[in-house]
Image (cartoon, rainbow, N blue to C red):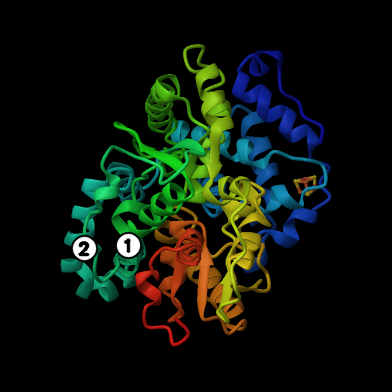
């Protein structure tokens, strides 16, 4: 694609990077076929190619964002299916990151939109506030139908619809600690506790720590970890996201210097995609660039790390698992085979639902901010999963777990919970009533 940025514009490193990305696009449109919003809405401006044109026009003309650009960029899930599909290697992820930051700086959103975003940014990344907000939202549940009728209040209705009916108690595994290996030591890792996941489903990291320590790996839950920053990063709140990134880089750098780390284990693939990008996010910060690149190189999804441990094969269990690959897993991190191979070797009968490349509609806060498109994608995803007639659904991202669980009665667990169970751990709580267990 030809571009016409001035030398003065290109002096801005963010613009210079976006220009390089734009020049790679050859307008072929292959990406439209796999873009969930184009597939759902059929509008070119809701396709990757359409958005690329909108971003180019906005940046090239040095214009503030307008309502049209914001509408179509807001509808993007950041699922990155387009990046997987693109034959020219267009780095859409960093282009849309730049566009979102530009929108945040130059566009004044309507009042309710600003309010919802401010609430989400102030609550979701903080586990204590998030837990309190979930409890308070139980009071609002009876009014969800009413809120749904007023377009400006729909995000609140979506929040209430997503609120689980009960919350598990806080887990002791979230507290800073060193969990020693059982038997001969094979490695030392840090684990990201996360923000929403420990509140919604602490059993995921509990299973991870139990499994790793049984396999001889010391697991450190470091003091001072915070949210990875991905929730606010996708809202264009760059400073808040970079603040979280710097805080985590400091925490993990201390751990690396203290006792060495073989990996930083992440059990939510949405967080994994962002932490693997810390090196890029902080590349212009001389105090952090090198440390952030080191942290990114150590970041591993739990299934990536488990593959390196060569787990023993287990007897077949006769349990059908529909594996849902989160977008951040398959498109963001390009991890496609490891989780399924681990599940198969652990004795599960793994099935791939049709249209596995399409997002389930969760996408961070997307299911709150764009609930209509999100609901359509969820219904499509659940149809494809249920067609597999699974006993259980497995995935590697808490957002997908919460989203899909609101659309089906089939139990959904994290991949690592099945692996922990297969390798000597307890049956996951959600599966205790399954006839085959
Ligand atoms: S990130 Fe996903 S929703 Fe956004 S343009 Fe690419 S394929 Fe479409
Ligand atoms: S597939 Fe790649 S090169 Fe083709 S239109 Fe989409 S982003 Fe551009």
x then y, percent, for residue 23: 78, 32
Q: Whole-Å distance between the Cαs marked 1 and 2?
A: 8 Å
Q: Which residue is mark 2?
A: 137
Residue at the far bottom in the pictured view: 435
What residue sits 43% from the left and 19% below the top? 257
Residue 178 appears in which quarter of the rendering?
top left
Query: Which one is in front, 400 or 183?
Result: 183
Q: Which residue is mark 1?
A: 159
What residue sits 65% from the left and 43% below the top? 54
141 sits left or right of 22 in the view: left
Residue 360 visible in the snapshot? yes
Residue at the far front in the pictured view: 183
x then y, percent, for residue 206: 35, 54
Of the two numbered discs 1 and 2 on the same chain, state the one appearing first in sequence.
2
Q: Determine the secondary structure under disc 2.
A: helix
x then y, percent, for residue 228: 42, 38
What residue sits 56% from the left and 24% below the top? 293
Q: Which mark is residue 182?
A: none
Looking at the rendered image, the quarter that the N terminus falls into is top right
Q: Are dots 1 and 2 in contact, CB under 8 Å? A: yes
Looking at the rendered image, the quarter that the C terminus falls into is bottom left
């Amino acid at each position: 694609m030809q571009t016409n940025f001035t030398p003065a514009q290109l002096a801005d490193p963010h613009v210079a990077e976006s220009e390089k990305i734009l020049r790679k696009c050859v307008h072929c449109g292959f990406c439209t076929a796999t873009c969930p919003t184009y597939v759902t809405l059929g509008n070119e401006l809701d396709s990757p190619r359409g958005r690329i044109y909108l971003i180019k026009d906005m940046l090239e003309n040095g214009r503030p964002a307008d309502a049209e650009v914001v509408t179509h960029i807001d509808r993007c899930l950041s699922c990155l299916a387009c990046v997987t599909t693109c034959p020219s290697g267009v780095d859409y992820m960093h282009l849309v990151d730049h566009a979102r930051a530009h929108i945040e700086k130059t566009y004044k959103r309507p009042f309710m939109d600003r309010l919802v975003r401010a609430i989400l940014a102030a609550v979701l990344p903080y586990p204590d506030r998030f837990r309190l907000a979930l409890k308070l939202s139980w009071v609002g549940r009876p009014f969800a139908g009413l809120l749904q009728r007023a377009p400006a209040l729909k995000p609140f209705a979506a929040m209430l619809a997503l609120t689980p009916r009960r919350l598990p108690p806080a887990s002791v595994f979230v507290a800073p600690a060193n969990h020693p290996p059982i038997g001969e030591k094979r490695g030392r890792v840090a684990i990201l506790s996360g923000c929403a996941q420990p509140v919604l489903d602490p059993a995921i990291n509990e299973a991870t720590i139990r499994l790793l320590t049984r396999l001889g790996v010391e697991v450190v839950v470091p003091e001072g970890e915070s949210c990875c920053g991905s929730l606010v990063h996708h809202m264009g709140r760059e400073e808040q996201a970079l603040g979280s990134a710097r805080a985590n880089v400091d925490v993990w750098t201390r751990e690396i210097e203290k006792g060495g780390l073989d990996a930083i284990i992440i059990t939510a693939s949405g967080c994994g995609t962002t932490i693997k990008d810390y090196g890029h996010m902080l590349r212009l910060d001389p105090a952090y660039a090198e440390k952030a690149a080191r942290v990114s190189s150590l970041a591993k999804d739990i299934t990536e790390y488990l593959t390196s441990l060569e787990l023993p094969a287990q007897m077949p269990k006769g349990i059908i698992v529909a594996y849902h690959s989160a977008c951040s897993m398959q498109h963001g991190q390009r991890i496609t085979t490891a989780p399924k191979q681990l599940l198969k070797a652990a004795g599960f009968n793994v099935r791939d639902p049709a249209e596995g490349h399409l997002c389930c509609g969760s996408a961070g806060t997307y299911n709150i901010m764009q609930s209509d498109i999100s609901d359509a994608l969820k219904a499509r995803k659940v149809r494809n999963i249920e067609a597999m007639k699974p006993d259980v659904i497995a995935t590697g991202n808490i957002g997908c777990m919460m989203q899909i669980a609101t659309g089906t009665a089939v139990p959904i667990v994290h991949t690592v919970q099945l692996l922990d169970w297969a390798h000597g751990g307890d049956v996951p709580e959600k599966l205790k009533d399954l006839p085959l267990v």
